[in-house]
Image (cartoon, grey):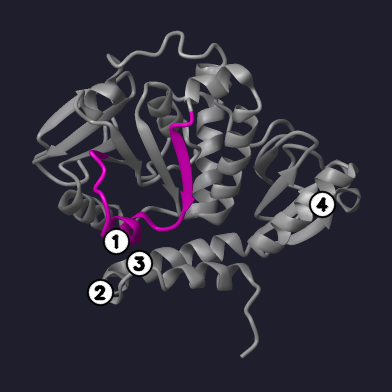
Amino acid sequence: MMEDKSATGGIRDMMGMVPTQERARGWVTVMSGMAKAQSAITMMVTSDRERVLARAKILENRLRLDLIDASECPGAGAGAGGGVGGATLVMTDDHLELADDESKPGPGVMVDWRDFLGRGKHGLSRRQPLARAIGKDARTILDATAGLGRDAAMLAALGYQVRAIERSPIVFALLEDGLQRSLNDPIMRDALGGRLRLEEGDARAILAKDGPAPDAVLIDPMYPPKKKSSAMARKSIRIVRQVVGADDDAAELLAIARRVARRVVVKRADDSPPLVADPTATITGNTVRYDVYAR
């Protein structure tokens, strides 16, 4: 049988990680939607440096994307969708970003933690809502839906040992790029303290494996951006949603996490209903809410 090198084939490979009984409860639907979204993504390089071009070629093969020449897309560049439809993964001289054709020219979506780690741990406190929701007794955290990694990075900077899981190959590539740039910065590297580990895969399968259970699990299902969010936040959520689709299996992930960990925290928009009724506790922030399920 010929090897399937398409984006759909790559995500289909991941299906084997999840037990059959879990796939029967909707996982195939979610992953098929992700595969369809990824099939509309192309990759573009806006640099002529050999080092960058070599890295782009490796990533192209890993993600099974079509690599297009920026010169073939007049007006395209970092932050431009390339005019090819769908979304474009753009590799620049110094970072990786994701853009779409709906965006105006300018910065695309990238993993960048400088706004809260650029001064090290200054301003970070375990009195913040996320840390209060995780709990003072937790040491090890599994972030089951890492996304752009902001929560995972913040928890690592606060001293927790964090294992961040992301199942979208595209978003995981952005995460890897952002973490590497953070580690290249002495201040941010010191803040993270070697406590953040990234892993590509489906958190349901990872949680189902035998091994030490994390003290707490964080779940942040995709939800619509709030109207009062910044334009950049709305843009980030829109583009990421375009790539990963809706988290229709979030309730299943919560059920598995509750069987494994003594404490599960679900991040929600402050005006969204609980993912599952009757959380043990609720911690509120400015625009988000953390529903805690403890046993």
Query: Horizontally, is 283 left or right of 153 in the view?
Result: left
Asked whether, in this view, residue 26 is left or right of residue 31, the answer is left
The mark nearer the N terminus, 2 or 4, is 2
Callout 3 amino acid: Trp
Which badge, 1 or 4, comes first in the chain's sequence? Answer: 4
**Which type of secondary structure does the marked residue at label 4 adopt?**
helix
Q: Earlier in the sequence, mark 3 or mark 4?
A: 3
Q: Residue at x 31, y 58 (%)?
A: 204
Going by the numbered disc 1, the residue's amino acid type is Lys
Q: Position of residue 54 (x, y in %)?
A: 82, 52
Q: Earlier in the sequence, mark 2 or mark 1?
A: 2
Question: Mark 2: which amino acid?
Answer: Gln
> Magenta includes 207?
yes
In the image, which residues are magenta?
A: 194-216
Provide residue 26's location: percent of width, then percent of height.
31, 68
Q: Going from the N terminus, do you reach mark 1 or mark 3 first?
A: 3
**95 or 191: nearer the viewer:** 191
Q: Residue at x 66, y 27 (%)?
A: 184
User: Which circle, 3 or 2, is nearer the viewer?
Assistant: 2
Which residue carries the number 1 mark? 209
Q: Label 4 is placed on what type of residue?
A: Ala
Q: Can residue 110 be seen in this snapshot?
A: no
Q: Earlier in the sequence, mark 3 or mark 2?
A: 2
Determine the secondary structure under disc 2.
helix
Label 2, label 4: how far apart the Cα atoms are: 41 Å
| Labelled pair 1, 4 in contact (Cβ < 8 Å) | no
| Residue occupied by mark 4 | 54
Q: Is residue 81 above or below residue 138?
A: below
Neighbor class of circle 3 (other Cα within 10 Å; few <14, some 14-19, many 20+) is many
Quickly name the residue at label 2.
Answer: 21
Image coordinates of residue 219 in percent, x first then y, are 31, 42
